[in-house]
Image (spheres, helix red, strand yellow):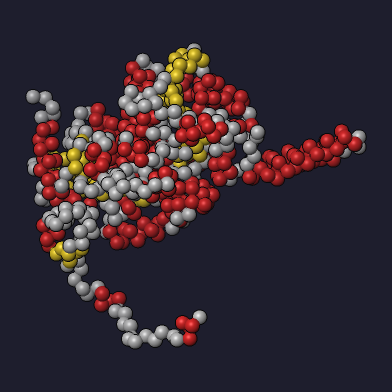
Amino acid sequence: MAVDLPFEKPLIELRDKIEELKKFTEDKGIDMSTEVATLENKAQLLAETIYKELTPWQKVQIARHPDRPTTLDYILGISDDFVEMHGDRNFRDDPAVVGGIARFDGFPITVVGTQKGKGTKDNLYRNFGMAHPEGYRKALRLMKQAEKFRRPLLCFIDTAGAYPGPGAEERGQGEAIARNLIEMAALKIPIVVLVTGEGGSGGALGLGMGDKVLMLEHAWYSVIAPESAAAILWKDATLGQKAADSMGITAQDLYRFHIIDDIIQEPFGGAHRNPAQMIAKVKQAVASSFQELMAYNYEELPALRYEKYRHMGVYTEDTL
Amino acid sequence: MLKDLFPKKKRYATITPHPSSRDKVPEGLMNKCKRCGEILLSKELEKHLKTCPHCGYHFTMTAEERIQVTLDEGSFQAFEDRIHTENPLEFPGYLEKLEKVQETTGMQEGVLSGSGTIAGYPVVVAVMDANFIMGSMGSVVGEKLTRAVERAIELNYPAIIFSVSGGARMQEGIFSLMQMAKVSSALARLAEKGLLYISVLTNPTTGGVTASFAMQGDLNLSEPGAIIGFAGRRVIEPMIRQKLPDEFQTAEFVLEHGMLDQVVHRKDMKPLLATVLSLHAQGGSL
């Protein structure tokens, strides 16, 4: 069953009314086609107004839509011969992170990403896409393997954040993310990062240092999930909307801030409304990013990556 | 209510001391230990490097105090980074808050960095300050730490970072998060150059700082009882609907789980740093 978002309600009501009129025409044989046409026109205009000027909070809701394509949808949709690899070789396999090797545009790549579930049961299994340390360590194992075989690396991010739990703390959630950052900084392979839905804090960055970082049009990426920010700043998690609107978390914000390199447009109304089209667009964007990066001598990439991250941050400096 | 019929009369006039008279009491003559409650004379506390001689509780130190007790006397030369915090997200109230903190701490931002010697061994050292918006990491903190590490690379010196932090600075949003990537990138270069990096995690070190440079040391050290973690207890407890044990996320707990090399009493920190530095002084080759 399709899930509608709160801000889509007027549109849904209008569409229901159109359906009603159509049914009426059929059942009673009374011609209502002019009325239907007028309303359809109105619905189209309303949809355009709603989707063209989405607020950050509305984007957050689209980014969290249960029907939004997941990392595995993208991996299977854009590559062939995907061979999934499990486990961090230390503790266990974390289902919130998936990864492996695949063929993309004819050449082998390594893919890793956070994986949300589809439906309640799957989401419980995937821990709602919130990784434990072993998830980050599995990803690192695959990244180092990619470097060994000089395979480009593709990372998918769609997570509310790294899992905040006792087990995660005991096994070093902080250390696991920290390790990935220092290792990704030095990887001598091209890295393309895609933020496809939610980019929650260190849990996202732990798979997110790349030569090209792309975001889907309605994805968000922030230092903290809006609700958690509200809880800290105003001691009220229900102010998530206020936090979302004031923290600059949308793809458009991050592009303006020079934090990300490009935005991938979503189908009208969001990726979940046309997954096939979304996947095709992602494939195209990934292909052109890899084409560009694979022209470099891989040994030079860490220095370029250094320059990229070196310039992040906003401050003023006195001239002496 | 019956009680309302008998209004309670104040038997004594209350006298509130004039605010100015409060300032006349010699400041910080005595301190109460936050753990065991013993009253400690300030001089006594200072002699014990701000640790309680009765129970061993480690008081918070300012960045300046930390440099004083760690580096050889007179050896510290601060890096003069004339950089100032901005409000990139136009976050309401951020600059006002910053001004207030600058006034009370006398610091421009939450890091003090420079070069100096420990037992004669040259080092670059950067110290975060807990009094500066919880030691949170914004653009300037990240930039100062990055520059410190870059100077260590230039000078061919080991780097030591004393962290204390609530994590990323919310008010700077994504810019704050990217400081984790920036400092980590600089430390990756330091490592590539074969230089030593010692991370000392002091109370408390949490969030994005734990998830980046604080956990990237060749040695990760801490002080007794320091709280170290990624997600705070206040986030975890409602999530699991359970109360966590007191020792959860203490330095001792983190040591036991393999994320630290040692938990070191403050009085032993400088000698240990000196030994470690001496063991790296030959660049590892015999």
Q: In this image, B8 relative to B263: left or right?
A: right
State the residue in front, A12 or B18. A12
State the residue in front, B47 or B67. B47
What residue is at 27 percent from the left and 31 percent from the top? B189
> How many numbered discs, if any?
0
What residue is at 13 percent from the left and 27 percent from the top? B284
Q: Where B256 falls versus A144 (above or below)? A: below
What residue is at 43 percent from the left and 45 percent from the top? B239
Quarter occupied by residue B163: top left
Q: Where B195 falls versus B108 (above or below)? A: above
Q: Position of residue B101 (x, y in %)?
A: 33, 59
Q: In this image, A94 relative to A13: left or right?
A: left
State the residue in front, B207 or B241. B241
Residue A101, can we see it? yes
What residue is at 54 percent from the left and 41 percent from the top? A60
Q: Position of residue A147 (x, y in %)?
A: 35, 19
State the residue in front, B172 or A88. A88
Quarter occupied by residue A154: top left
Q: Position of residue A79 (x, y in %)?
A: 51, 18
Q: In this image, A38 relative to B113: left or right?
A: right
Residue A246, can we see it? no
From the image, which quarter does the C terminus of chain B lie in? top left
Q: Where B45 falls versus A103 (above or below)? A: below
Q: Position of residue B25 (x, y in %)?
A: 21, 73
